[in-house]
Amino acid sequence: MAARTVKLAVIPGDGIGPEVVAEGLKVLSAVAPQHDLAFDTTTYELGAKRWHATGETLPDTVEEELRGHDAIFLGAVGDPSVPSGVLERGLLLRLRFDFSHYVNLRPVRLYPGVTCPLADAAPEDVDMLVVREGTEGPYAGMGGVLRQGTPGEIATQDSVNTRFGVERVVRYAFEKAAVRPRRKLTLVHKDNVLTFAGELWQRVVREVGADYPQVSVDYCHVDAATMFFVTQPRRFDVVVTDNLFGDIITDLGAAVAGGIGLAASGNINPENAFPSMFEPVHGSAPDIAGQSKADPTATVLSAAIMLDHLGLGAAARQVENAVAGDLQARAKDGGERSTARIGDDLARRVAEQG
Amino acid sequence: MAARTVKLAVIPGDGIGPEVVAEGLKVLSAVAPQHDLAFDTTTYELGAKRWHATGETLPDTVEEELRGHDAIFLGAVGDPSVPSGVLERGLLLRLRFDFSHYVNLRPVRLYPGVTCPLADAAPEDVDMLVVREGTEGPYAGMGGVLRQGTPGEIATQDSVNTRFGVERVVRYAFEKAAVRPRRKLTLVHKDNVLTFAGELWQRVVREVGADYPQVSVDYCHVDAATMFFVTQPRRFDVVVTDNLFGDIITDLGAAVAGGIGLAASGNINPENAFPSMFEPVHGSAPDIAGQSKADPTATVLSAAIMLDHLGLGAAARQVENAVAGDLQARAKDGGERSTARIGDDLARRVAEQG
Ligand SMILES: CC(C)[C@H](C(=O)O)[C@@H](O)C(=O)O
Ligand SMILES: CC(C)[C@H](C(=O)O)[C@@H](O)C(=O)O
C-alpha cells in the first residue's frame, strides 16, 4: 500500500475536457509509484450535459462531497448550447469563490523548443509567474440592470476589492517573488482611472512590500502591460493583479509562451481550508472535441502545479521535466500526435526518470 | 485668404507632448494650402506645469473656450510628479466625457516596411479599426471606499453601461464596418462573467445589427481577443468594445502594429455637438522628453483622423500617404532622425503630393 493517498476529485467537464483530463491522470499514475503515492479518484459529471439533463450546475450535495477531497482536477466546462455565463458562474466561479481560491496561479514560461509568436523572444525572456486574485474584483458578480429593454436601460457591473482580499494575495505574491532569482514583483492595474480600487492595491503593495525589502517592486498599467508582454516580456518576473486584469493578461501570456495548449493554472487556497483546483487555462474547445486533437500538455502542467501544492515538489519537477523533454522532441520531429499519444509519451518520460 | 478656416485648439501637454504636437502642426501647415485651408490655432497650457503652479487641471473658463473650437489637437498629459489619476481624470477624461467623445477611434494597421514584433504577420494581416466606447463603462469614475485604512476596507469601482451609450457607439461601428471591404464586426467583451453589462452589449449588437444585414457579426471574449491579436490578427476587421477593454486591446494593437510611436486616435463626437479631440495613443514619456527622440508619427496620423472627421478626406489621405512613404524609407535606410527631422520629412512628402 502507498504511504500516502491523495483523495482527488475529477471534473472532466465538456468538450476536450475529458480527453485532456484522461492524459493528466495517466501522467499522475506514472509518477505516483515513484513517490509512494496513490491517487484515489472520484469523477464528478458536471457541465453542459448535466445542466441540460437536470438544470443543475453544482448541487450543494456535490459541492459538499468535493470539499472532502484533497484537490480537484478539472478539464474544462462550457458549451455553445448553454447560455454564456451559466456554467462559468454556476460551476467554475462558484467553486473558486466558495473554496476561497484567492490565488489563481498562472506561470507564463516559454519552454525551449516551443515556437513563440514573437519574432525576438528566447526562453530566458519569458519566465514569469502571474498571481491573479481569484475571489473578488469585477468577478464578484455584483451589479444589476434597471429599466431592461427600454431606451433608459442601465446595466452596472461592480468591482469589489477588500483590504482582506487584496492583502492575502499580495502577500502570497511577495512570498513567491522572494524565492525567485530575480526577486521582482510588478503590480498590474489601472490606478489612473480605477482610482478607488487602484489606490487600495497600490497601498497594500507598499505596506506588504515593507516586509520584503529584498523584493524590488514595480508598477505597470494594464494597457501598457499587454504591450510589454509582446515587446519586453523580460520586464516581468512575478506579476500580481486583480481578477479581470489577470484573466486578460494570462491569455496573452499563454499566446506569448507558445499557445493555450501549454498554459497551466492552479486555483489555490494556500491555507488548505478548502481543496484547491487545478485546470488548464484553455476552454472546452468544442470545435475540436472528440477528435483526439487536443494537446493535453496544459492539463499535465496543471497536475504539476497540483503536486507542488500538495508538497510533492520532486514529483512536480519530474512531470515538468517530462514536458520539457517532450517539447524539445517536438521541435525536432514535429509530427502530429493524438491526445492519448502525447499522454503516453509524457507518462513514459516520467517513468524513465524514476 | 483660405476658403475655409479651421479653429483648432492645441493642448501640447507634458513630456514629449509639445515636441510631437509641433510636428503635427507642421504637417497640417504643409497640407493646408493645397486644400485652400487655414488652421487658426490657439494653444492652451494645461497639464502638469499648470497643476503645480495653480492646482488647476481644466478651469471651467478654459473648457468653455475649447468648446468654441472646431477640433482639439492634444499631445500627451501626465508626469510622475503629479499623483496618478489627477490629470487623467481632471483633464483628459473630463474632456472626453464633457464633450461626449463617445467614439474613441483607434485604427490598428501594420504599414509596409514596419517591423512587427510578431514572427509571422504581414501588413495584410493587421488592418483593423477599433471603436472603443469613450464615455462610460468602468471609466465613469463611480464607486468609492468604505472604512479606508482599516482591515475592513472595501473599495468599489462601478462600470456603468447605458442602452443610450452602448447603442450609439455600436451603430457607429456598424456604419464603419459596412463600408470596409471585409464588412465584419467583432464585439469584444467578457459576457460570461460581466453578465449584466455583457448581456446589454450583446443584445444591442444583435438589434442594431439587424439594420446592417451585409455586416457579419462575431463575438470574442476579451481574454481570447488578446491571444488572437498576436496569433491571428486577421480575425479582426472592425472591433467594438467598452471603454476599459478598448484601452487594453488598443495598446496591444499598437504593439502589434509596430509600436506606440505609430498609434493614432480620435476622440470623436460624431454629431459635432462638441469639438472632437485627436491625440496619439502614447503618453508623455518623461524618460525621453526634451531629447528630440520621440516619433511624431502617431501624432501626425492623429491629425489625419482629424482631417477625416472635418470632412477633408483628400487631405487625410495625403498625410497617410506621406507616413506610408516615410515608413518604407525607414525600412531601407533605417537611420535615426530627430523628432523635428521626421516632421520635416513628412511635411515635404505631403507637399510633394500637391
Ligand atoms: C471561463 C471563464 C469564466 C474563466 C475566467 O474568466 O476566469 C477563464 O477565462 C479562465 O481564465 O479561467
Ligand atoms: C491616460 C489614460 C487615462 C488613457 C486611458 O486609459 O484612456 C490612455 O491610456 C489612453 O488609452 O488614451
Image (spheres, coloured by chain):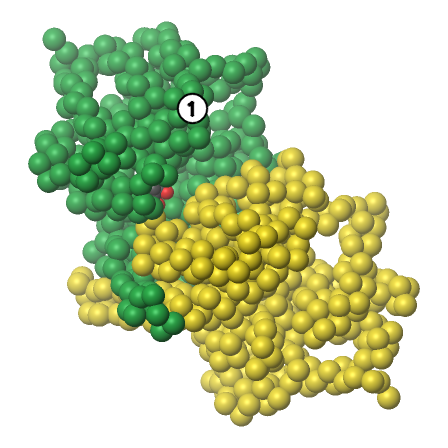
Chain colours: A yellow, B green
Disc 1 under 8 Å from ligand 2? The reply is no
Against B41, residue A58 (above or below) is below
Viewer-proximal residue, A54 or B345? B345
Q: Quadrant of residue A20?
A: bottom right
> Would residue B18 be visible to someone looking at this image?
yes
Please name whichever residue, B283 or B226, is drawn nearer the observer in this view of the structure. B283
**Left or right of residue A172, residue B138 in this image:** left
Percent x, y of residue B203: 32, 62
Which residue occupies 12% across, 8% down?
A: B1
Query: Along the horizontal axis of the image, is A151 left or right of A195?
Result: left
Q: Which residue is drawn at 78% across and 63% down?
A: A317
> Label 1's element?
loop
The correct choice, above or below, for A106 with respect to B18 in the image is below
**At 59% across and 90% down in the image, what residue appears?**
A65
Q: Which amino acid does label 1 sit on?
A: Ala
Q: In this view, does A216 lie to the left or right of B90?
A: right
The answer to whether residue B28 is above or below residue B286 is above
